[in-house]
Image: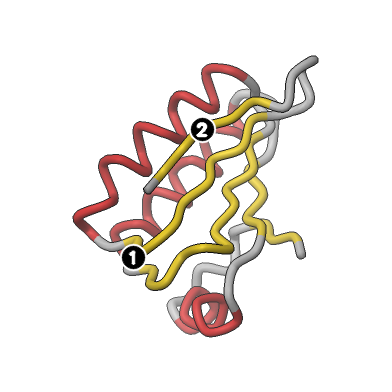
């Protein structure tokens, strides 16, 4: 499941993504990130509940990072499970900003 929440007061928007983030979830993740970016240029993608992350969703996250940057903000990836973080690094996608 993918949800969008704003922290209010211009302090960012958070996308919570749980379950498998595979090609089947890519469009939902994209839509949620666009909604979050419409609310604030600083977006956090909380992936602590992600079970899987494929290249389609990695591409969505990279595109969101670029869009946030163009809007003067940042995309922060939060809670990426270690195994998925390794997959991101192995894929050479080190351009994603991560937080604990």
Circle 1 — which element? strand
Quick one: SS at disc 2?
strand
Within 10 Å of disc 2 (Cα), the crowding (few <14, some 14-19, many 20+) is many
Please provide percent x and percent y for residue 68.
Answer: 59, 33
| Residue situated in front as seen by the camera: 33 or 94 | 33
Question: Where is 4 relative to 29, above or below?
Answer: above
Is label 1 in contact with label 2 (beta carbons under 8 Å)? no
Q: Residue at x 64, y 30 (%)?
A: 13
Left or right of 73, for residue 95: left
Residue 85 lies, in percent from the top left, at 56, 76
Cα gap from disc 1 to disc 2, whole angstroms: 17 Å
Residue tagged 2? 4
Q: Residue furthest left?
A: 24
Q: Mark 1 points at which residue?
A: 20
Q: Which of marks 1 and 2 is nearer the N terminus?
A: 2
Percent x, y for residue 73?
69, 31
């Amino acid at each position: 499941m993918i949800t969008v929440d704003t922290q209010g007061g211009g302090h960012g928007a958070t996308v919570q993504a749980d379950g498998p983030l595979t090609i089947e979830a890519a469009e939902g993740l994209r839509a949620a990130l666009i909604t979050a970016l419409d609310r604030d240029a600083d977006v956090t993608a909380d992936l602590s509940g992600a079970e899987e992350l494929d290249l389609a969703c990695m591409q969505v996250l990279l595109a969101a990072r670029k869009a946030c940057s163009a809007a003067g903000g940042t995309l922060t990836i939060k809670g990426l499970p270690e195994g998925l973080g390794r997959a991101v690094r192995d894929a050479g996608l080190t351009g994603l900003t991560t937080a604990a």
